[in-house]
Amino acid sequence: MSKLLGLNIKHLRKIRNLTQDQLADKIGVNRAMIGSYEEGRAVPKLPALQILSHYFNVSIDNLVNTDLSAENSPTGEAQNIDSTGKNLRVLTTLVDRDNKELITLVPVKASAGYAKGYADADFVETLPKFSLPFPELSQERTYRAFQISGNSMEPIPSGAYIICEYQQNWSDVKNGKTYIVVTKDDGVVYKRLYISDDNTILLKSDNPEYNPYTIPLNSISEMWRALGYINFSLPEPDELHMGKLAAMIYKMQDEIDELKKEKKS
């Protein structure tokens, strides 16, 4: 297994025009380990294997058991996007003494590290953990809290903590709803999503000052459906008024867009 796996890592690295140093930096190991993987002298541990799988957009099964350098073999291009989560997506979670799953908190200062180490159990264990007694949160689901920064999703303020539920199947995304998306290039972002038929996804801010943008599905590492938020900065009366006004404007814009679509059809 280690020999074929090493050949595949080397093959995929060269397709991306990456040096061993660059690949090592992207998956959070030292350069010597990449050399050991490629030469078959060492086998990546499961967290590193998961990150390699996500980064190259190749299932772990293909990475380990298929010669990806052979003609017509899967090489992680857009046509092999696993949007339904059928392939292995192992999520690192932690439990309390009663074996109840805890909510992991990703503060702003840890966002960049999370984008690289989301599948690294050692990294996830360093993040704060807590539980919430709310009946809206099922014990059968996995939750995570992400702190956001900036004003692109106003009226939700910068510094708020978004409580999210893990989204295993990306095909279940509801257009126009808000999600935390962990991407390979942009890190952790909180946006309103719209799925397209061409394996891309539109990310839209609630603040109209920010332009929407599109990313390919194969650039996504994790997706979390937003359920609510916690904020420790109480709004002033004027802020409440402006927040409601911004929400009304956004709703009106959505309704206008829907009317335009109906007229075209």
Image (cartoon, rainbow, N blue to C red):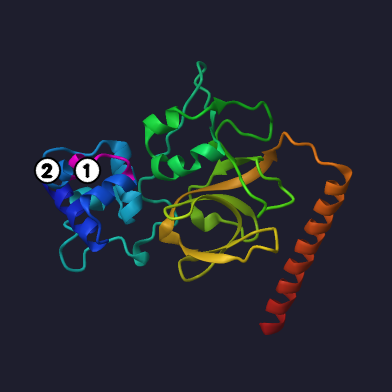
Give residue 60's position: percent from left, percent from top: 28, 48
Residue 70 vs residue 160: left or right? left
Residue 74 visible from this viewpoint = no
Query: Could one spot residue 244 in this view of the protein?
Result: yes
- The residue carrying mark 1 is 31
Q: Residue 48: image x %, image y %?
A: 30, 40
**Relative to 19, is 208 above or below?**
below
Q: Which residue is mark 2?
A: 40
Magenta-drawn stretch contains 32 = yes
Neighbourhood count class around disc 1 (C-alpha, 10 Å): few under 14, some 14–19, many 20 upward: some
The residue depicted at 78 percent of the width and 57 percent of the height is: 247
How far across and how far down the image is residue 238, in percent?
87, 48
Q: Amino acid at mark 2?
A: Gly
- Which residue lies at the image location 24% right of the left edge and 48% below the top edge? 21
Quick one: label 2, few (<14), some, or many (20+) residues within 10 Å?
Answer: some
Query: Of the residues tagged 1 and 2, which is closer to the observer?
Result: 1
Most common SS among magenta residues = helix
Q: Taking 45 as reference, is 231 left or right?
A: right
Residue 41, quarter of picture? top left
Q: Amino acid at mark 1?
A: Arg
Side (left or right) of 72 relative to 221: left
* Magenta stretch bounds: 27-34
